[in-house]
Amino acid sequence: MLVDSESICNKVVWKLIGQTTEDGQVQHIAIIGDSFSVGRSAASNLCLPTTSVSSRHAELRVVGERLYLKDLSSTNGTYLNGAKVRGEVELKSSDLIQFAKMVFRVNRSGADTGSRTVSHASEDGALAIMQFDRLINDGGLLPFYQPIVSMVDRQVVGHEVLGRSRLYGLQMPDEMFRAATQLNMEAELSEGFRFRGVQVAQPRLKGSTLFVNTHPNEIGTSRLLHSLATLRELAPQQSIAVEIHEGARAQLVVIKRLRAVLHDLDMQLAFDDFGVGQSRLVELAEIRPDYLKFDMQLTKNIDAATPAHQELIRSFTKMVNDLGIKTLAEGVENEASHELLLDMGFHLGQGFLYGRPLPIGETLT
């Protein structure tokens, strides 16, 4: 039986922090008694109901103020800080234990808390790296979809695919990419977002244009081109727009090549987080992307901006529209901003006013 450590008084010394199911909430689990069993069996003190965990997987043993771990000849092994456990080993606060694919952080209540904020960030970063394989290969990615609407009638015409996860330490994109950067796997994660996002959307959002993101490290690589071709094979009828972030800053010839490939794949091109005065102004005339997503800092709360700022955005919007590029305002959160952006000539809008990012079963279609 699980006992949440938050309900236990100061007698509790040791606890495990992690998820007991692959998509469950993070729990703080107190280790009670001299012997604490871990396994798939419901009779275990810590039941992990996943097929990768053995029925009797491992045992934790408290001796005085010390904690020991022993693997019980499990099929997929028990690991301490990435190393397979052989025999019985002593644990320390901040250690990372892996029962097959299920990862937990060891914590000792009452241990030195003077620098716990920094320590926790470091520990959870290590835990995230250990779980990264689950994120990429075991369906750990959970796509969210934020609606994109026509400014004139507010009809949903597209959705941006945004990456989320239920894995402890990897719930949000910045956490995922921090782990990916340490493993030099940014491209794999970016690909995973796109494939999972399009796969889950089928066929629910078949009539919507899916805006999928790229990572700056992908731009100009043959891997990206192959990835997009495979994505088209996955969803031959789906309308797809590929976003390039302002931070990519690729050479003009590289963007032109990508534009040609997207044309051949019947995909569209969107410049994301575009700012007035950026070097890409030249690219607009040369490449003519299908969409230009204005940097949120330019359009969010535009109704409260200075007249000079509003006039700048109005002029820039007209220039982009005259090039035949669809303009999209991000960060639209109130009616006054919507009305002003519509008057400025924006074609599309995205923001909390129209809908928040949600899983496929809850999103506005």
Image (cartoon, rainbow, N blue to C red):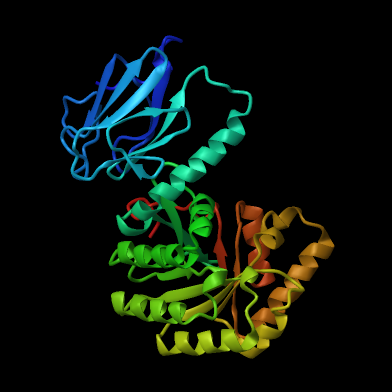
Q: Would residue 184 be seen by someone viewing this image from the given angle?
A: yes
Q: Would residue 159 be seen by someone viewing this image from the given angle?
A: no
Spot occupied by residue 328 in the image (x, y as percentages of width and height): 59, 69
- Residue under the point 44% across and 62% down: 189
**Above or below for 295 versus 232:** above
**Which is nearer the eye, 173 or 57?**
57
**Which is nearer the eye, 122 or 202?**
122
**Which is nearer the eye, 164 or 210?**
164
Spot occupied by residue 160 in the image (x, y as percentages of width and height): 47, 63
Instruction: Indicate left or right for 316 with 85 as reference.
Output: right
Instruction: Indicate left or right for 258 with 64 as reference.
Output: right
**Above or below for 171 versus 118:** below
**Above or below for 129 versus 210:** above
Q: Quadrant of residue 144?
A: bottom left
Please state, as top left, top right, bottom left or bottom right, where the C terminus lies in the image.
bottom left
Spot occupied by residue 286 in the image (x, y as percentages of width and height): 65, 90
**Which is nearer the eye, 216 or 277?**
216
Q: Quadrant of residue 31?
A: top left
- Residue under the point 51% across and 44% down: 125
Instruction: Indicate left or right for 142 with 35 as reference.
Output: right
Please state, as top left, top right, bottom left or bottom right, where the N terminus lies in the image.
top left
Q: Residue furthest front?
A: 87
Spot occupied by residue 25 in the image (x, y as percentages of width and height): 37, 35
**Above or below for 188 versus 90:** below
- Residue under the point 21% across and 34% down: 57
- Residue under the point 49% across and 40% down: 124
